[in-house]
Image (cartoon, rainbow, N blue to C red):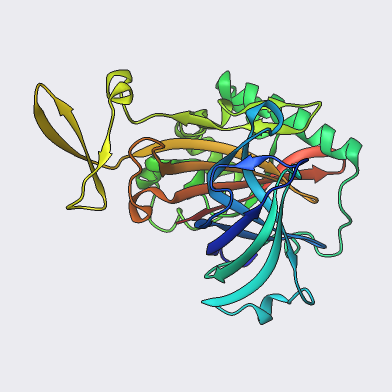
């Protein structure tokens, strides 16, 4: 698998009578996300979801399919810092537009399963349903059951399984694959670190996921009205008792999942708070897990980090 690449996107949304109105409709805006390459398609996993009025359930859109205006370029034809003009279609089909994409990193799912065909609808349903059982094992802190979903040795790194607890790993273990013996050694820490994955809401019939977000702000802080600080673009202020109070941006803990043609990608990490967004340098970090069907059974086959 290649590294994870972030892109900056200038996207102009085009709305019509049968299409939803997006939050930034009719104006050019910059979006950031991860470019994901599959066997036959490319998509952009947005760092900050977009809300479109008229979308199903008032849905926040988290992914757009990329359709290149010319021939689909190969990975070697998308060098770092390049820009590619593409047509963008959200996965729900509620908005279209053109995007100039600045590529700084790429994640390729086709490298993990060379030649594997896309999953059937039945396989996708089976994979998503099995993920809910994985979540229950995490929720119950059932170490033995959780181990049945891990394809030892799990390719990639051990560190993502421990999150902030990775500092407890012995030298050289963080970047090494997760082996069965290493799992047994750190099983308590792993079960604790993976708890945010249990919070992802899953709708098996529709194959949809809703993120789990642990807001960094208290309810009282969320209720305040904030304005951008004109003297510092990374700060905000609020008025209280006739005084202005300056505050900085913060990061939420967020986990989410995205189903692709050949795998289920599940993420756990930091994201900018929706009310007081922290800087990308501080908030854009994710541990990433890939699940797929192996002989008809769901297995976690790869773990890595980005950001």
Residue at (72%, 33%) from the top-left corner? 208
Location of the N terminus by quadrant is bottom right
Asked if residue 292 is positioned above or below residue 252 in the image, the reply reads: below
In the rendered image, residue 300, in percent from the top left (x then y), is placed at 68, 43
Q: Nearer the viewer, residue 278 or 163?
A: 278
Q: Nearer the viewer, residue 41 or 270?
A: 41
119 lies left or right of 54: right
In the rendered image, residue 39, in percent from the top left (x then y), is placed at 81, 62
216 lies left or right of 291: left
13 lies left or right of 212: right
Residue at (43%, 58%) from the top-left corner? 172
265 lies left or right of 288: right
Q: Is residue 257 visible?
A: yes
Q: Nearer the viewer, residue 246 or 197?
A: 246
Residue at (33%, 46%) from the top-left corner? 278
Asked if residue 73 is positioned above or below residue 256 in the image, the reply reads: below
Among the 4 quarters of the image, the one containing residue 93: top right
In the rendered image, residue 271, in percent from the top left (x then y), is placed at 43, 43
Q: Is residue 188 visible?
A: no
């Amino acid at each position: 698998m290649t590294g994870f690449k972030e892109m900056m996107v200038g996207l102009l949304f085009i709305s019509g009578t049968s299409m939803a109105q997006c939050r930034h409709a009719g104006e050019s805006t910059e979006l950031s996300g991860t470019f994901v390459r599959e066997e036959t398609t490319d998509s952009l996993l947005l760092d900050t979801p977009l809300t479109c009025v008229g979308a199903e359930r008032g849905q926040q859109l988290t992914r757009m399919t990329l359709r290149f205006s010319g021939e689909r370029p190969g990975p070697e034809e998308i060098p770092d810092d390049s820009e590619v003009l593409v047509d963008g279609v959200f996965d729900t089909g509620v908005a279209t537009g053109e995007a100039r994409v600045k590529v700084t990193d790429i994640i390729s799912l086709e490298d993990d399963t060379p030649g594997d065909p896309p999953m059937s609808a039945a396989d996708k349903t089976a994979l998503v349903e099995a993920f809910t059982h994985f979540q229950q094992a995490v929720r119950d802190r059932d170490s033995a059951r959780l181990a049945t979903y891990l394809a030892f040795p799990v390719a990639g790194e051990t560190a993502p399984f421990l999150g902030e607890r990775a500092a407890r790993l012995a030298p050289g273990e963080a970047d090494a694959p997760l082996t069965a013996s290493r799992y047994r050694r750190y099983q308590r820490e792993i079960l604790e670190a993976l708890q945010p994955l249990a919070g992802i809401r899953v709708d098996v019939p529709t194959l949809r996921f809703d993120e789990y977000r642990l807001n960094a702000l208290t309810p009282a802080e969320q209720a305040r009205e904030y304005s951008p600080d004109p003297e510092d673009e990374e700060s905000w202020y609020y008025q209280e008792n006739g005084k202005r109070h300056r505050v900085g941006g913060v990061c939420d803990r967020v986990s989410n999942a995205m189903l692709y043609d050949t795998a289920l990608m599940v993420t756990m990490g930091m994201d900018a708070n929706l009310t007081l967004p922290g800087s990308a340098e501080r908030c854009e970090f994710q541990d990433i897990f890939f699940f797929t069907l192996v002989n008809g059974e769901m297995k976690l086959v790869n773990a890595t980090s980005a950001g």
